[in-house]
Every structure is written in structure tokens, then in C-alpha cells.
Amino acid sequence: MKHTAMTILYEVHDNLYVNLTNKCPCACTFCLRQTRETMEESGPLWLEHTPSLEEVIAEFQKFDMNKYQEVVFCGFGEPTEALDVLLATARFIKEQFGKPIRINTNGLGNLVNGKDILPLFKGLIDTLSISLNTPNADRYHELVRSRFGEQSFDAMLSFARNAVNYVPEVVMTTVATTLTSEEEEQCRKICEELGVRYRIRPWED
């Protein structure tokens, strides 16, 4: 039997999340998609195919956009893997609804796209939330298992450092309960040095 449910948009608290792709250069040991198909109220987040801009826009017609504080690009994949659709969707959201837009990312979008993508976010993206995960490059590689290998940790830090030139709010996150308080302190220092905000997010976020 053909499974037809495909969740492109889903609600989390007061925000609307956009699930654009299941592609990701990482295989993080703690990733939720290894153990589940859905988030709180969503349908299955495994996509049958990568949605086109038209499909994404059609989904927005089904939601009352007044209900949401923010639109967040985040799903079962790295949003910058679908960069063209992401940018076009963000333009659509700004023009139609004027909502703040956040991207939750692993910070490897420049490696994924083979170019500096940050200038493309200027004027479109309000918040960039980058997964720092750990203050230590070796531990990062163990946890994140990026297909780009050793260069990934430094690429992610450099992405965050440059992001502040194009995006009003840049946040780096680690997950509560996964680090010691010393490691969290080291992460705080890294964020201070990069000029970004540090946030410890709940395990489920």
C-alpha cells in the first residue's frame, strides 16, 4: 500500500516548522530521527520526495499564519541541503506573512553547497541556530560523524563567526544533560569569542 502522508509543515509550541529535506551530511549519535518518525503533533517527517517550492507554498495555504510567532526551517534533515527551495520559501514567507524566520542548522551549509551561503541570508533570515554540540573537535567528530570529516568542526565555527555579518541573531546550542558543566563553560567561551549567543536547549527541543 502506498504511504501518502508527507509532512512538510508542522507545529511546535507557537511556531511553524518547515521540513524541506531528509538529506544531512551528519549521522549524529543523538539524532531523534534515528528512533522516531514524528515530532509531538506532526505526521511522519520522512519525506517521500524532496518537496518543490510549489508544494511547500501549497501547504502554507492550509495554516492560519496569525497563530505563529516564528517560522523555523528544521525537520528530519539539514535545511541548507535544500538551499534554493529554502531561500525561495523564506522570500515567500516574508512577502506574504512578514514573520520572523529561523534556520536550525548543523553549520555545515558552506561545505554542503560548496560556497559561502551566508550572504544569501541577509534580509531574509532573522535567527540562525547552529548546533555546537561540544567544545572539543575530537568529541564533535565522534558524536556528529560528518561525511566531511576532520574539517567539519572548524568549518562550523567559521560559519558561526561569519554569520553575524548577515543574520541579526546567531545562537549556538548544546543539548542539556549531554555535557559536563566544564564543557558547557568551554562552549560559553567559544560563543563569546565568536560573538554569538550560547543556549543550552532541552533534550527534546
Image (cartoon, helix red, strand yellow):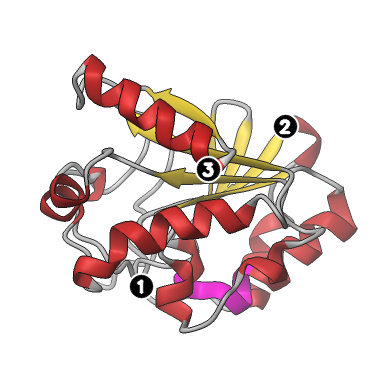
Q: Which residues are magenta?
A: 81-86
Residue 129 seen in the current view? yes
Q: Residue furthest front?
A: 193
Please rate how many residues cluster around mark 1, counting C-alpha atoms within 10 Å: few if below 14, some from 14 to 19, many from 20.
few
Please identify the quadrant where the N terminus is shown: bottom left
Residue 84 within the magenta-colored segment of the rendering: yes
> Residue under circle 2?
69
Q: Residue furthest left?
A: 142
Which residue is painted at 72% across and 32% down in the image?
69
Which residue is painted at 35% across and 66% down in the image?
22
- Which mark lies nearer to you, 2 or 1? 2
Q: Secondary structure at mark 3?
A: helix
Earlier sequence position, callout 3 versus callout 1 = 1
> Residue under circle 1?
48
Residue 194: assigned label: 3
- Which mark lies nearer to you, 2 or 3? 3
Question: How much space separates mark 2 and mark 3, taking CA atoms?
Answer: 27 Å
Which amino acid lies under the numbered mark 1 shown in the image of this protein? Glu
Q: Position of residue 129 (x, y in %)?
A: 52, 43
Please rate how many residues cluster around mark 3, counting C-alpha atoms within 10 Å: few if below 14, some from 14 to 19, many from 20.
some
